Structure formats: C-alpha cells, structure tokens
Amino acid sequence: MKTELKILTAAVAALAVASIISTPNSSVILLLFSPPSIPHSRDHLQAAALLQLAGAFGPESIAFDPAGNGPYTGVADGRILKWTPDAAAWTDFAVTSSNRNDCVRPFAPEMEHVCGRPLGLRFHNKTGHLYIADAYLGLHVVGPDGGLATSLVSVVEGRTLRFTNDMDIDEQADVIYFTDTSTQFQRREFMSSILSGDMTGRLMKYDRSNKQVSVLLRGLAFANGVALSQDRSFLLVAETTSCRIIRFWLDGPRIGECDVFSELPGFPDNIRRNSDGDFWVALHAKKGKFANWIVSNHWVGRTLLRLPLSFKQLHYFLVGGQAHATAIKLSKEGNILEVLEDCDGKTMRFVSEVEEKDGKLWIGSVLMPFIGTHCL
C-alpha cells in the first residue's frame, strides 16, 4: 500500500477512535460498527433461561459426563464446576493448578497463569475421565471423581504451550485433537492476537497410547474450537480472526489436506457436533464494517494496539459496542441451517459455546457470570 494511502487510512482510524470516545452513539459510528443482520435469523435467544454462577465468571465450555450428569463448566478463577439439579447448586469438581492460595477472585486475569484457566472440556465416554484444555497449563485429565487434574501435554516441539484452547476426542482412534491458539500471545492477550493478525495457531493430535504429540496444521489465525465429524472423516477447527471454519481431512482421497468448510458473519469460538451430525458454532460477535477492515489490514490493528486504548475500547472495534449473541448451526457440508440470536443482548451476550442435549441448547459465555438454556 502506498504511503499516502496509509496516512489517509490512519487518519480515518484516528477519527473513528476519537468519535467512539467522544460520541459513541452517533449515527456515523453506529453505521461503521453496528453488526450486520443475518438472513433468516431468529431473535430467540433473548428468551433463554439463565443458570447463574454464584461467585464465578466466564463459563467458556460446557460438558456432560457419560451418565448425562452436569453440566460441568470451567470458570475464570481456574475451577471446574458441576451443576447438581437436585440440590440446585454448583459444586467444585476439579482444578488444573495446585497453587491456589491466591485464587480467590472470580475474575483476575493477572492470576490466570497461576490459577489455571480451563477452556475446552470433553468427557471420554468409555473411561468417564474429563479432558481439559487449560489456556496456560496445557492439556489435562481428571478422573470421574474430580480433584486435581493430571498434566498430559504442556510442551510441544520444545516450547511451552501459551494458549491451549479446545479439543475433541476420537475414542475409536484413541487420540485427542486440540488447538494452540498462538505461540506468541497468552489468553489474557487475546485482543492483541486478533488485532495484530497473529497466525501462529496450531491444530495438534495427542496419541493416548504412546503419549506423543504431532502438529497437523500450522499458520492458523487464532485457532479455536475443534469438532470431529460423525463419520470421523474430517476435523473442524475455528479460525476466529478470519471468521471461518477450516476442515482437515482425516480419511478419504484428500487425507492430510484442508479446505474452507464455512465462511461466517462473525468471530467463531467453539464448535460442537449434535446427535444428528450437524455443528453448532458460537460467535463471540458478528463482524461489522470497521471490524472487517481491521482484520483485513493487520497493520491497522497493530496501530490501534500502540494507542492508549483500554481493553474495552479495543473490544469495541470488533463487537461494535453491542453485546449481542449469535449461534449458528451448520450442516455436515458446511451450509447454514439455522441462526439464533439475541440481537439486543437482553439476555445472552458474547457466546463462547453452544452444546445441544435432549432438545435443549446449553450456552456458555467467556464474559458472563451465567449459562443460558434454550429449548429447541
């Protein structure tokens, strides 16, 4: 890009920043930052029921054990909680760190590397063990009775994992597929990873029989959610920054290759397959015009990171200042089958995972103190 054009573009960005700070509700700003509408979307998630997390925050992922008990969820202070319907209460189930003396606040990003930050959760149906992708401490496992989890993978290719994110388990092949979002940034720096255009994310495979790790894909733009197809022929991984789902072929004539499974109207987080073999994708936020400009021109994001802006202001560039929720169901071929939203953020906001179980959606959010439920 020519120097003159860069200067002009930077001036536009600076004007936008100044406008956000001074007049965040102006019509121009709303036009630039408002999330787009999605055809055939249904604004139903505002009717979701809420399961509050007393003294906890950020239920990123949701899982049910092989007996159907739960849900279980990991929260920002490093604990994994279990919901007991009969007692109508959450109880402590597991942790990934033994060093928890100072892990007393529901939300303390500066302590995450000490306390642990469990993100993706998956149960192994045959053993009843819970596998945990801890953002700072790597891949862990804990038995059916809970307690302190055991570390399985914390170092790959001689380097400590910086941002372990999500996983899925192939019980037949006895392997676990998991993502490392970035080799440069940690979880609490996720805005820097997105805005800088970081493409160091990886998709990896852990072989439970020989405890070996292999890297399947490199160069991913914020590697996030993982889901295995029902026939085990391919694996899906969310690329949050590029707003798309990548398909990695595990079987067939294209084995070892990847392609784009679906382009999405926003930033995908976790992916979960339902009993029919379709996939629910949670969008952290839809992508407005300004957000699209940022992620398409990485130097713009890097410029914003050098400005004296708070996390909230930087986050505004991606979400448009509107705390809404979007869940998208994709077919086995990657076509959009259904879109559910809370367009005004009245109930659900910043969705991180959508788990379908027995005709109900269980909805997590990395930035909220509750789990939502929605009957289909």
Image: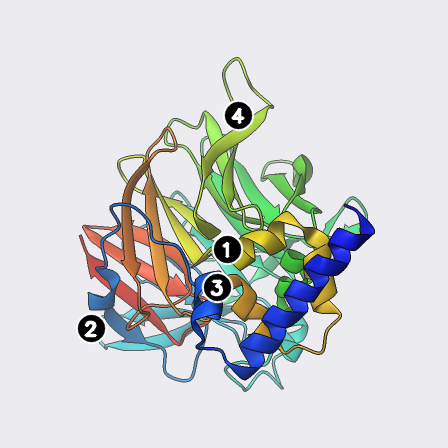
Give the structural element (helix, strand or loop) at label 2: loop
Camera-nearest residue between 284 and 173: 284
Q: Which residue is the site of mark 3?
A: 33
Residue under the image location 56 percent in, 76 percent down = 19
- Using the numbered discs, state the Cα–Cα distance from disc 4 to disc 3 in whole angstroms: 36 Å
Describe the element under mark 1 as helix, strand or loop.
helix
Gap in angstroms between the C-alphas marked 2 and 1: 47 Å
Say whether disc 1 or disc 4 marks the residue closer to the N-terminus: 4
> Given the image, on which type of amino acid does mark 1 rest?
Lys
Earlier in the chain: of badge 4 and badge 3, it is: 3
Q: Quadrant of the N terminus?
A: top right
| Secondary structure at numbered mark 4 | strand
The location of residue 193, given as percent across then percent down, is 67, 58
Mark 3 and mark 2: Cα distance apart in space: 44 Å
Q: Nearer the viewer, residue 297 or 142?
A: 297
Per the model, the C-alpha gap separating discs 4 and 2 is 43 Å
Q: Earlier in the sequence, mark 4 or mark 2?
A: 2
Instruction: Identify the disc placed on residue 289.
Output: 1
Q: Quadrant of residue 27?
A: bottom left
User: What amino acid does circle 4 point to?
Assistant: Trp
The 10 Å Cα crowd at callout 2, few under 14, some 14 to 19, many 20 or more, is few
Q: Residue lying at the far top in this picture: please name it.
A: 253
- What x and y, as percent, mark residue 362? 30, 59
Q: Is residue 79 left or right of residue 184?
A: left
Say which of marks 4 and 3 sits in front.
3
N-term-proximal mark, 3 vs 2: 3
Instruction: Say whether marks 1 and 3 touch (CB < 8 Å).
Output: yes
Q: Are marks 1 and 4 in contact (CB under 8 Å)?
A: no
According to the image, label 4 marks what residue?
249
